[in-house]
Amino acid sequence: MRDVLDHLGPWYREGQRFAVATVIDTFRSAPRLPGAAMAVSAGGEAVGSVSGGCVEGAVYELAREVIETGKPAVVRYGVADDDVFAVGLTCGGIIDILVQPVDATTFAEFEDVAASIDTNPVAIATVVSAGSDLGNRIIIWPDRVSGGLGDASLDAAVIEDAVAMLQQGSTSVRHYGPRGERMREDISVFVQSFAPPARMVVFGAIDFAAAVARIGKFLGYHVTVCDARPVFATRKRFPDADEVVVDWPHRYLADAISRGLIDGRTALCVLTHDPKFDVPLLELALRTDAGYIGAMGSRRTHADRMARLTELGLTPAELGRLSSPIGLDLGARTPEETAVSIAAEIIAARWGAGGRPLSRTTGRIHGESLDHLRELTAR
C-alpha cells in the first residue's frame, strides 16, 4: 500500500469508497512480492500493480465489484493448465490477492495508518481465509492496537506475531486455530508490516562472519558485512549478505550513524578481535541506540578492550551495554554453532529474556511481553 498511498488519501477524504488489491502470498516465480498493491477508485482510476501486467485486468474488474458490494474477496491467479486463454501468470508463478473495500465505514483507522506508514512502525493483520470473518482486521502499533479478528485469544496470538514481525519488517500469511492456536490451518491471517527490515552489521570478514550473516538473513535482518581488507570482504565469500562493504569499520559506522541507519532494532556484531579495528569501532557503537552490541574475543582480549575503552572516557553504563565475549554459553565450537549462540543472545536481548533453559523457568513462557500484549487487547 505504501506505493499507492499518495492517491488513497485524497480518495478517502472525498468520502468515496475505493478498493485496494494486495498480494498476500506467492509461490514459485511470481512477479511481485507480498505487500505489492493496486488500488481502484470509485471513478475507475487504477494505480499500482500486483503482477507487472499479467492479471491486472482481472483484478481491476474484481476491484470494481468489491466497490459495489462492499465485500472483500481473495483470489488466486496462476498457470491455467486446462485453458490457455484463462487469466494467469506467464512466468509460471502463483499469487494470492486480497481485494478490500476502503471507506470511512470499512476502515475507520485508515488515516491513522496512513500517517504512521512513513513515520512509525505499524502492522495490519487481516483475516484472508474464506468465511464470515474474511476482511476482519486488527491494527498494531508498538504502543496500541485497534480493531479485532473476532476472538480475544486469536487477537493476542496475532498481535504477538505482528510485534515480532514489526521488529524485523517482515510481511507474510500466518495460520492459526480458532483460539489462536499455532500449528493449525483453520484461519489464515495476512500480516503486513510497514517498517524497514532491522539491520545487522557484521564487522570482520572472517569465517565466523559468513555464518553470522547467514543466520542473520534467516532471522529477517538486512545484513551488511564490513571489513577494511578488500581481499577478504568479497561477495563470493559472503553470498548471504545484502551488502559487503570495504571500509574501516569505525568509518563505516560513523557514516551509517550520520544517515540514521542505526536504531534500537540494530544488531552490531564486532568479530574483528583486533584492537586497531574494534576499539575505535566500539567507542562509537556504545554511544549509539543500537539494540545489541556484541564483540568477539577471549576473556583476556575482553579485559584489554574494556581497559582501552575506559581510557577513552566511556562510562560504566555505556560499557555495560557490551556483550563480550559475544554469544550465549552453548559450548559452540564451529562457526555455525557460534552463529547460533550469537543469534540466541540477540533474540534474548531484543525481548529482555534471560537466555536460560525453559525447563528451568516457571510461569508463562512469554512472560511480561505477553502481559503487555494482553493489556493492549483489553483497551
Image: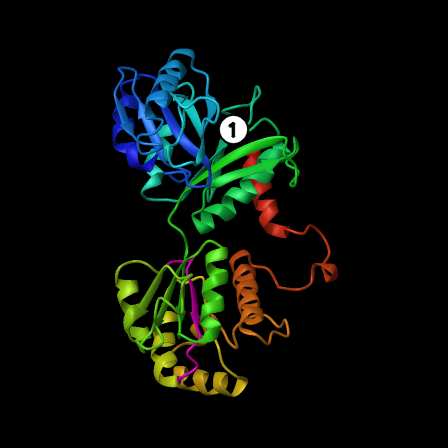
Q: Is residue 83 above or below residue 27?
A: above
**Tag 1 secondary structure:** loop
Q: Position of residue 102 (x, y in %)?
A: 38, 22
Q: Is residue 350 left or right of residue 330?
A: left
Secondary structure predominantly adopted by residues drawn in magenta: loop
Residue shown at the point (49%, 67%) measured from the top left? 211
Considering depth in this image, is 167 or 219 the residue closer to the camera? 219
Quarter of the image that includes the N terminus: top left
Q: Is residue 46 above or below residue 220?
A: above
Q: Position of residue 263 (x, y in %)?
A: 38, 58
Quarter of the image that includes the C terminus: top right
Residue shown at the point (41%, 18%) measured from the top left? 105
Q: Which amino acid, mark 1?
A: Val
Residue 265 on the magenta span: yes
Query: Can you tell which quarter of the image residue 32 is in?
Result: top left
Considering depth in this image, is 87 or 255 the residue closer to the camera? 87
Q: Position of residue 181 (x, y in %)?
A: 66, 38
> Is residue 377 visible to us here?
yes
Instruction: Look at the image and give the residue range highlighted in magenta.
Output: 263-274
Residue shown at the point (46%, 53%) measured from the top left? 220
> Is residue 320 visible to us here?
no
Work out which residue is located at the far top of the displayed protein and give it.
68
